[in-house]
Amino acid sequence: MEKIIETFGLTKYYKDEVVGIEDLSLSVQPGEIYGFLGSNGAGKTTTIRLLVNLLFPTCGKAKIFGKDIVKHHLEICKDIGYIPSSVRPHKHMTGEDFLNYMGKLSSAADPGNHYRSHLLKKFNFSEKDLKRKIKEYSSGMARKIALVQTFQHKPRLLIMDEPTEGLDPVMQHTFYELLEEYRDDGGTVFISSHHLREVELVCDRAAIIRNGRLVAVEKIHDLMKHTARTIYVTFKKKVNPSLLESDAWEIVSINGPTLTAKLTGDIDKIIKLLSRFDIKDMSLPNLSLQDVFLDYYKENGQ
């Protein structure tokens, strides 16, 4: 099956050999929502700008729909929906004129603008809103009109850099619903986000980039297996730490009657161990993608 996105040793150096990304090789499958994670300056936006040909690679190459992103840029872009992290739609246009203008640049048609109407309704745009100039929009409205233009031509691929920045929680939920609709209709998404809960909710796989280099690519569920869950126990009275030793956990701290530990083995062994003591409280919170992300960055003391 042809990959939607493929990169081969993709590298971008800025002035004075500052690393944007280095030796980046990844692939995105058809019908996949692929999350791209990293701290500020890790290389997320550089990667996206290379994919949409706003930057040229120092070396390496990338393909979208099996075609070289530099040689076939114009052809590829007609079937991509792109939203950058900083949205600056044409402020002197009305919302309606902006959508019409951007729609003419795509390869797909929407007779009668039925899908666009669906999008506008989902994002609570009125006819009056569309007649206003974009410079009169709030930042949230500017983000929403940019999202409508990203989806409106039903492209084969969405490339999105922090797409929900500036949206309120209700509109974020609306965006997630639209992503699911789009994927169910056969679309593919490459999404960069620092909202880890967002990636956890909507993505099939996620990549973590650190200092311009890829450090992990896995399914969300598998990615989270690599990080130990934290267990918190409060005893009714202080316990001798030597009595709590086990190869099934790594004790992080003991503060009076309260213990914090990383679960590294069979939880049944820990339950049997704890049954010897009087327990006041115990919790084992579900692991989040944020825990995984922070673990990868702590490895290098970042």
Image: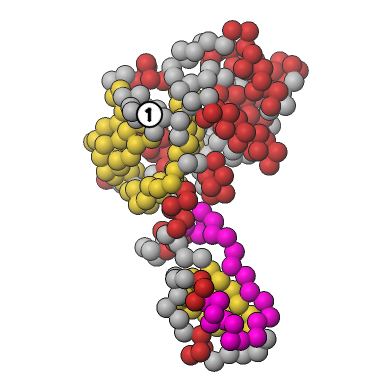
- Magenta stretch: includes residue 287: yes
Residue positioned 42% across, 59% down in the render: 226
Region of the chain picked out in magenta, as a range: 270-292
Residue pictured at 51% horizontal, 54% vertical: 289
Which amino acid does the dot numbered 1 rest on?
Ile
Was residue 249 drawn as part of the magenta stretch in this picture?
no
Image quadrant assignment for residue 75? top left
Residue drawn 53% across the image and 24% down it: 185
| Residue 279 percent coordinates (x, y) | 65, 82
Along the line of sight, which residue is nearer the eye, 115 or 143? 115
Q: Residue furthest left?
A: 59
Task: Classify 10 Å Cα crowding around label 1: few (below 14), some (14-19), many (20 and above).
Answer: many
Q: Is residue 41 visible?
A: no
In terms of depth relative to the viewer, which is nearer, 68 or 14?
Answer: 68
Asked which secondary structure carries label 1, the reply is loop
- Whether residue 126 is situated above or below residue 34 in the rendered picture: above
- Left or right of 148, for residue 106: left
**Which residue in the rendered view is the most extreme toward the top?**
111
State whether residue 287 appears in this view.
yes
Callout count: 1
- Split into 4 quadrants, where in the image is the C terminus? bottom left
Position in image of residue 242 (x %, y %): 48, 90
Query: Residue 84's x, y, as percent?
Result: 50, 32
Above-or-below relation of 31 to 17: above
Residue at the image point whose x is 52% and y is 30% from the top:
183
- Residue that carries the numbered disc 1 in the rendered image: 4
Quarter-of-image position of residue 11: top left
